[in-house]
Amino acid sequence: MVEDETDEGPRSLGLPRAPLSRLCLATRRVTPVTQMLRFVVGPDGQIVPDLTRKLPGRGAWVCATRADLETALKRKAFGRAFKGKGTAAPGLADLVETLLLKDARSALSLANKAGQVVTGTTKVEAALASGAVRGLLHAADARPDGVRKLNGFARQVETAGGQPLTIIDCFSGIELDLALGRSNVVHAALLAHPTTAGFLGRCHKLGRWRTGTSAGEGHGQGEDHAHVPGRMQGTDTE
């Protein structure tokens, strides 16, 4: 039953008739699992996030936002769901954020290995002009004038009929260097490709986690028209 506070484990989730929705411990609303996070009690008795939904044991679910997880923790909802078993560490929310960032960085590396990442301001501008870009990356520590210039150019391309894209600035320059295997990455563009879609999907999860809304919600635009990680907005982000 979707009203249960825990599932019966990964096998039950994989069954053809497994529920596609679960009860959120924080909101008490039945919500699609695609918008939720699963948690289990680890071997050491600590409650841990299960981003892949494959960890063994019964799982409890919370809507995938920091605010909802903090509400569940404040209400000691995990203790009720797991019948007193398991301890939630004070840094559980920070752990979730770390894992979501790590997952996004891994997806970015995969897109790069597939040859779908373009770096360097000149090459990024050329890619934007071609209309093939689906994601625009700025290092979190990039110079504001360079960010404004590329965002403005992306907005012009969209206005001229180009596809909407996602602007991402949740990674530092060092993190981009490590993910892409090159030095001094400040701006990058991701071309249309399945690996790019996978990366953007993870960024949307990160955006929902931080803001409480899916990318694009609240302003009538499609899901790709967003800014990660702060408030969600379009390519006029500055």
Image (cartoon, rainbow, N blue to C red):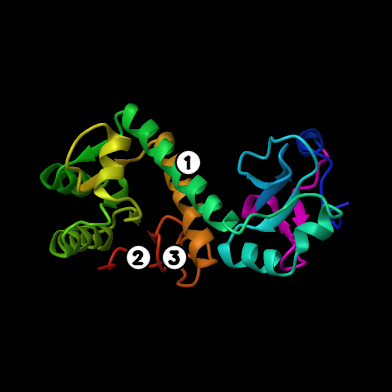
Q: Secondary structure at mark 1?
A: helix
Q: Is residue 9 magenta?
A: no
Please name which of the two marks, 3 or 2, marks the residue nearer to the observer.
Answer: 2
Which segment did they paint magenta?
17-36
How far apart are labels 2 and 1 at the CA level?
24 Å
Look at mark 1 in the image and give the residue it sits on.
Answer: 103
Q: Secondary structure at mark 3?
A: loop
Instruction: Where is residue 236? Give x, y as percent.
Output: 27, 68
How far apart are labels 3 and 2 at the CA level?
8 Å
Give, as a three-letter code, the residue at label 3: Gln
Q: Secondary structure at mark 2?
A: loop
Q: Is residue 32 left or right of residue 152?
A: right
Instruction: Where is residue 144? Give x, y as percent.
Output: 17, 64
Please name which of the two marks, 2 or 1, marks the residue nearer to the observer.
Answer: 1
Q: Is residue 132 visible?
A: no
Q: Determine which of the numbered discs, if any, sits on residue 234 in the image.
A: 2
Look at mark 3 in the image and give the residue it sits on.
Answer: 221
- From the viewer's perspective, is residue 138 above or below residue 106? below
Instruction: Where is residue 39? Give x, y as percent.
Output: 70, 48
Q: Which sits earlier in the primary sequence, circle 3 or circle 1?
A: 1
Q: Is residue 15 left or right of residue 35?
A: right
Q: Are marks 3 and 1 in contact (CB under 8 Å)?
A: no
